[in-house]
C-alpha cells in the first residue's frame, strides 16, 4: 500500500530467538498499529502508538514489545519467539480514525 | 469482551443471489464503523465506512451497509454477488481509549460463491 511498508514480508525463525518486524510510513500519520491475523480470530490488536514514544497495549500484547523512536517507524519485537506466534502480522497507520486507515501488505512469520 | 461481533463464520451464496453479512457492535453511542474485504493471500481493502449522517452507506464494488442504532447493527449487503466477491469480510469499529483511537475487528465472515 502506498505510504506504508512492512519488512520483512516473510520470515522463518526458530523457537526462542528474538524477532523484530518493521513498519515504515511516509505519511507522517500520528497513529500506528500492529495486528496479528489468525484463522477464526480475525485481526487482533497487539500494540499501537499514538505518537513518538507513546504506545499502548492491545488485546494480545503478551510476548510482544514495541518501540517508536521516530514518527515513521514502528517496530514490533518478539523477545523469544514461540510457535503460538506463528501468524500474519499487519501494520496500519491513521492520522485520525475518521480519516481512514491504511494497511501494509503483511508479514508472514513462521516459528519452528 | 468483543466489541464487534460477526455471528456468521462462513456463508455460501449462489452467484447472482443477494447477500447480507451481519455485524453487531457494542461500543459507543456514535460508533465509527467499517467493512473491509480480504481476498486470499491479500491485504485489507476498505469497502465502506459510517461515521454519521445517512444510515445507508454506499461503498465500492456495489456493496452497501445500513446502520441501525436500535439493533446495534451494521450489516453489509449486495443485491447480486459475483464469483469475484468470494473473500473474507471484516467488520470493524473505532474504540476510543482516553482520547486515543484503535480499530477493533470482528472475527470475520468467509464468503463462498457457488455457480
Image (cartoon, rainbow, N blue to C red):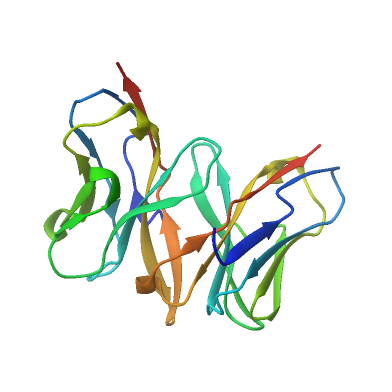
Q: Residue at x 40, y 49 (%)?
A: B106
Q: In this rendering, does residue A36 appear at all?
A: yes
Q: Residue at x 42, y 51 (%)?
A: B45
Q: Residue B25 appears in which quarter of the rendering?
A: bottom left
Number of numbered discs on residues: 0
Q: Identify whether B42 is placed above or below B10.
A: below
Q: Which of B68 and A101 is in front in this view?
A: A101
Q: In this rendering, does residue A62 appear at all?
A: no
Looking at the rendered image, the quarter that the N terminus of chain A falls into is bottom right
Q: In the image, A93: left or right of A98?
A: right
Q: Residue A96 appears in which quarter of the rendering?
A: bottom left
Q: In the image, A38: left or right of B99?
A: right
Q: Which of A6 and B96 is in front in this view?
A: A6
Whole-percent x, y for residue A29 in the image = 53, 77
Q: Identify whether A31 is placed above or below B10.
A: below
Q: Identify whether B55 is placed above or below B42.
A: below
Whole-percent x, y for residue B23 in the image = 28, 47
Q: Residue at x 59, y 52 (%)?
A: A105
Q: Identify whether A47 is placed above or below B77.
A: below
Looking at the rendered image, the quarter that the C terminus of chain A falls into is top right
Q: In the image, B97: left or right of A50?
A: left
Specify the farthest residue to the top: B115
Whole-percent x, y for residue B8 in the image = 32, 35
Amino acid at each position: 500500500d502506498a505510504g506504508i511498508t512492512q519488512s520483512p514480508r516473510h520470515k522463518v525463525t526458530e523457537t526462542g530467538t528474538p524477532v523484530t518486524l518493521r513498519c515504515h510510513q511516509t505519511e507522517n500519520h500520528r497513529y500506528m498499529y500492529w495486528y496479528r491475523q489468525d484463522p477464526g480470530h480475525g485481526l487482533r490488536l497487539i500494540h499501537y502508538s499514538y505518537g513518538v514514544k507513546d504506545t499502548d497495549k492491545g488485546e494480545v500484547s503478551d510476548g510482544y514489545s514495541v518501540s517508536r523512536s521516530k514518527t515513521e517507524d514502528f517496530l514490533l519485537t518478539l523477545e523469544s519467539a514461540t510457535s503460538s506466534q506463528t501468524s500474519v502480522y499487519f501494520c496500519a497507520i491513521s492520522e485520525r480514525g475518521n480519516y481512514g486507515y491504511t494497511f501494509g501488505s503483511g508479514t508472514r512469520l513462521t516459528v519452528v | 469482551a468483543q466489541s464487534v461481533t460477526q455471528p456468521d463464520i462462513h456463508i455460501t451464496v449462489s452467484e447472482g443471489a443477494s447477500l447480507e453479512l451481519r455485524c453487531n457492535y457494542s461500543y459507543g453511542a456514535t460508533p465509527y464503523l467499517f467493512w473491509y474485504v480480504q481476498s486470499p493471500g491479500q491485504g485489507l481493502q476498505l469497502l465502506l465506512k459510517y461515521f454519521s449522517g445517512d444510515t445507508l452507506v454506499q461503498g465500492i464494488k456495489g456493496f452497501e451497509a445500513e446502520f441501525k442504532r436500535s439493533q446495534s447493527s451494521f450489516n453489509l449487503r449486495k443485491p447480486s454477488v459475483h464469483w469475484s466477491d468470494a473473500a473474507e469480510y471484516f467488520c470493524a469499529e473505532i474504540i476510543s481509549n482516553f482520547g486515543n483511537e484503535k480499530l477493533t475487528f470482528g472475527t470475520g465472515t468467509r464468503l463462498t460463491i457457488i455457480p
